[in-house]
Image (cartoon, helix red, strand yellow):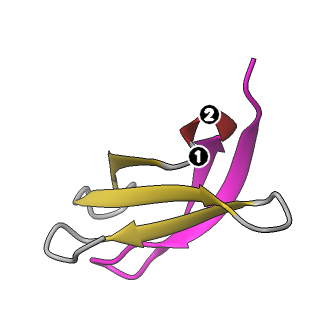
Amino acid sequence: MHQLTKKHIGCPYCGETIKVLIDSADINQQYIEDCQVCCKPINFLVSESMDGDLDVNVYSEDEAF
């Protein structure tokens, strides 16, 4: 089973800070998840930092990865 990690991200649309669960199996993956506040689609890019932590970058639909 993969480990889930809690992360706080800022929605690129409404600016609200929301809590998301990131699956360690999603490293180097891109996916879309709707904002829990404004319901707009957030693009997620999950990567691993040099020290082994999960990094999450979020983008709106009109921003490039």
Using the image, tell me which numbered label, if any, was put on residue 27: 1
Residue 57 x, y percent position in the rendering: 49, 69
Secondary structure state at the residue bearing disc 2: helix
Q: Quadrant of the C terminus?
A: bottom left
Query: Quadrant of residue 29 in the image?
Result: top left
- Residue sitting at 45 percent across and 58 percent down? 45
Q: Which residue is mark 2?
A: 25
What type of secondary structure mainly makes up the magenta span? strand
Q: Is residue 26 above or below residue 10?
A: above
Residue 58 x, y percent position in the rendering: 41, 68
Is 36 left, or right, of 61 in this rendering?
right
| Amino acid type, mark 1 | Ile
Residue 30 x, y percent position in the rendering: 38, 49
- Residue sitting at 75 percent across and 17 percent down? 1
Q: Which residues are magenta?
A: 1-23
| Amino acid type, mark 2 | Ala
Is 20 left, or right, of 16 in this rendering?
right
- The residue closer to the viewer here, 30 or 14, is 30
Q: State if disc 1 and disc 2 touch (CB < 8 Å).
A: yes
Using the image, tell me which numbered label, if any, was put on residue 17: none
* Residue reaching furthest to the left: 62
